[in-house]
Amino acid sequence: MSTERVDRPISSRAEELGSRLRARGWSLATAESCTGGGLSDAITDVAGSSDYFLGGVVSYSNSVKESMLGVDPAVLAAQGAVSELVAAQMAEGVRRTIGADVGVGITGVAGPGGGTAEKPVGLVFIGVAAPTGTKVRRYQWGGDRVANKRHSVAAALEMLLSL
């Protein structure tokens, strides 16, 4: 199971991210699947987030991943929506589509259903596309649906803070 700095509230991570993006003059866009807009919600809970947050796409269906984010249908067919490459393509696609300096893509199996032996409940891939390149991390959470979504939001914020 992956661990993040769970002792730190999501709100303080989002505030710090805003300060860092503002200091760099960078803008941010999100592409979320299993978190259902939770990352965008956390970011926009910070007053003044319109200075750096341009928008996001909740791409729950594969058709939205393809049409709005440019995720390759062949990759979706071969690897499924919950994969490292799809997270990377979501991050790169939202960055390009919205015109942001940084894009983040989150895809996974929140649960309680939908898991398989190969892709169990709690499996999440988070991609961050920035001027310095694209990075993806794999996480395996062990909570229920709500906990898995919150852990994913916290992990995405930590990844963004590591830029």
Image (tube, helix red, strand yellow):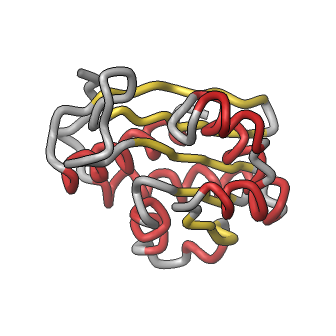
How many numbered badges does the structure rendering display? 0
Res. 85 image quadrant: top right
Q: Is 130 above or below relative to 70? A: above
* Quarter of the rendering occupied by the C terminus: top right
Q: Is 25 above or below relative to 129? A: below
- Residue pictured at 67% horizontal, 63% vertical: 64
Given residues 58 and 45, the one toward you in this image is: 58
**In this rendering, position of residue 131 left or right of residue 86:** right
Q: Residue 88: x, y in percent?
A: 67, 36
Res. 158 image quadrant: top left
**In this rendering, position of residue 131 left or right of residue 128:** right
Q: Is residue 25 visible?
A: no
Q: Residue 53: x, y in percent?
A: 63, 68
- Residue pictured at 68% horizontal, 46% vertical: 91
Given residues 71 and 28, the one toward you in this image is: 71
Given residues 130 and 34, the one toward you in this image is: 34
Q: Is residue 96 visible?
A: yes
- Residue pictured at 39% horizontal, 63% vertical: 38
Q: Residue 48: x, y in percent?
A: 54, 77
**In this rendering, position of residue 67 left or right of residue 137:** right
* Quarter of the rendering occupied by the N terminus: top left
- Residue pictured at 72% horizontal, 60% vertical: 27
Q: Residue 33: x, y in percent?
A: 50, 55
